Image (cartoon, rainbow, N blue to C red):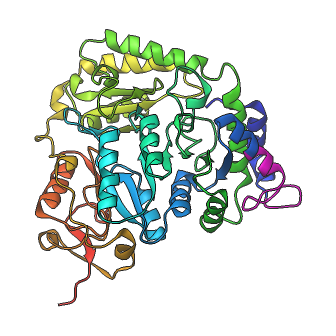
């Protein structure tokens, strides 16, 4: 990882810098000194009116943004592929979800962004139900580097009097080079929450929340974060956030990573049978406004294997660690510290893998996609489901019961059912087929999917 030399010195003596809220070190919950100065510098850098440092990741930022904008009974319009934090935020705030299904890539089984038309329909649904929309929450960019038309989405939100919250976890670097997509705040978003540790150089668990404009109360954000964050924050995390901001501003920070990304695309396109998401999607199509050049998504099935098998081979045999994988893709993230030598290692690994037996990767038919099933019936809000009495029942007894856990299959990374919604036999079958086909189902306690948590219903 490429970091500022000054911060490398701090980490070399981490014990002596693992401090607490001593005089002169300021207070994260109500900063007036050094923390405030660092946050103000970040706000200017990222194009915000105010910035808050987060020591519990983007999770806390998403929760705070929802708590600051949505109260009990308000509607939160959100993309169905939002992070787990969005669902816990609804349990905390007591708001009512109105879901917008992202555009589904049927060939790859992955979700892109939401369309302006779909968002407008969601607002009309809220109006027909007589609900006040507290905010809209979307993911941009996706894990695969695909961005949405944030400017148009923001325009629709503001037309209906609601702020746009953007989970920009994987886009903290967008503000630092013209080759990157335009940041959400610069396109009219009211809040952007960024995982500074993902592409920039801060420590894991450290993130930032940015607010621009007057639609979201700074005071409410501060109060929400006081409730959600530790009163004894790690000053190593705080220092790393300030260092990451300063490092990203250096003129050459992204020169070599961008050169490496360009070299990777050139090398991979020269390999017979190697595929890239960039060549599969069309910018300007529904749900696809742009692509992050630092995100490489390999199409594993073009190599005759699953993404899970390709990821295992890359890591175990060639020392190449991917960001994530699905049934048909392997996603690699470049950032400060990525060099052309690294992508040559990747290209060489893929060339070697091409010659291996496809028998390693025989599997059953790909599972049905959750996004193709109708949204389940919602009988309880996420908050009601969170506080409800629950029980765990065998899979063959779970159909028709109200689910008490969030179950998200990969592919496509869209929750099939969330707490408060009814489990159907079709959803249960799809989840089990996903797991049997080599996919993953996140969120459930029982990884075998032989049992499910449901809301207790007295006889």
Secondary structure character of the magenta stretch overall: loop
Residue depicted at 62% across the width and 57% down the height:
217
- Horizontal side, residue 16 vs residue 204: left or right: right
Q: Position of residue 9 (x, y in %)?
A: 78, 37
Q: Position of residue 177 (x, y in %)?
A: 59, 23
- Horizontal side, residue 49 vs residue 142: left or right: right
> Magenta part of the protein: which range?
20-39
Could you tell me if residue 344 is visible in this image?
Answer: no
Q: Quadrant of the rendered structure where residue 199 is? A: top right
Q: Residue furthest bottom?
A: 459
Residue depicted at 41% across the width and 33% down the height:
147
Report if residue 120 lies within the magenta region: no
Instruction: Tell which of 383 and 74 is nearer to you.
Output: 74
Could you tell me if residue 122 is visible in this image?
Answer: yes
Q: Quadrant of the rendered structure where residue 374 is? A: bottom left
Residue depicted at 15% across the width and 46% down the height:
368
Quadrant where the image shows the C terminus: bottom left
């Amino acid at each position: 990882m490429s970091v500022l030399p000054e911060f490398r010195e701090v980490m070399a003596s981490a014990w002596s810098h693992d401090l607490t809220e001593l005089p002169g070190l300021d207070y994260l919950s109500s900063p007036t000194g050094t923390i405030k100065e660092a946050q103000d510098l970040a706000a200017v850098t990222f194009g915000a009116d105010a910035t808050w440092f987060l020591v519990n990741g983007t999770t806390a930022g998403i929760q705070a943004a929802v708590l600051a904008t949505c109260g009990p009974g308000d509607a939160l319009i959100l993309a169905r592929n939002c992070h787990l934090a969005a669902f816990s935020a609804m349990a905390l705030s007591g708001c009512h979800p109105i879901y917008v299904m992202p555009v589904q890539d049927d060939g790859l089984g992955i979700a892109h962004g939401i369309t302006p038309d779909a968002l407008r329909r969601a607002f009309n649904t809220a109006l027909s139900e007589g609900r006040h929309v507290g905010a809209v929450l979307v993911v941009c960019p996706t894990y695969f580097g695909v961005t949405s038309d944030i400017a148009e989405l923001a325009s629709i939100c503001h037309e209906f009097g609601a702020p746009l919250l953007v989970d920009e976890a994987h886009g903290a670097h967008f503000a630092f080079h013209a080759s990157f997509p335009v940041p959400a705040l610069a396109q009219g978003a009211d809040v952007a929450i960024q995982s500074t540790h993902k592409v920039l150089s801060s420590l894991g668990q450290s993130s930032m929340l940015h607010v621009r404009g007057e639609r979201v109360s700074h005071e409410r954000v501060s109060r929400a974060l006081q409730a959600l964050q530790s009163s004894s924050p790690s000053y190593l995390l705080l220092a790393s956030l300030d260092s990451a901001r300063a490092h990203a501003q250096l003129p050459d920070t992204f020169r070599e990573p961008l050169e490496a990304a360009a070299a990777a695309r050139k090398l991979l396109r020269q390999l017979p049978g190697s595929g890239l998401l960039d060549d599969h999607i069309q910018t300007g199509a529904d749900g696809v406004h742009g692509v992050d050049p630092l995100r490489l998504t390999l199409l594993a099935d073009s190599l005759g294997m699953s993404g899970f098998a390709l990821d295992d081979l890359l890591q175990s045999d060639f020392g190449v660690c991917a960001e994530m994988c699905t049934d048909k893709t392997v996603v690699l993230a470049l950032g400060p510290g990525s060099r052309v030598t690294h992508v040559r290692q990747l290209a060489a690994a893929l060339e070697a893998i091409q010659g291996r037996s496809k028998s390693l990767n025989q599997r059953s038919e790909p599972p049905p996609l959750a996004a193709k099933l109708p949204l389940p019936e919602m009988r309880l809000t996420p908050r009601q489901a969170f506080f409800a009495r629950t029980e765990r029942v065998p899979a063959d007894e779970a159909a028709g019961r109200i689910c008490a856990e969030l179950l998200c299959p990969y592919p496509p990374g869209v929750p099939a059912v969330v707490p408060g919604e009814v489990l159907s036999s079709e959803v249960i079958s799809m989840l089990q087929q996903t797991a049997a086909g080599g996919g993953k189902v996140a969120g459930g306690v029982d990884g075998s999917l032989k049992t499910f948590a449901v809301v207790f219903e007295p006889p």
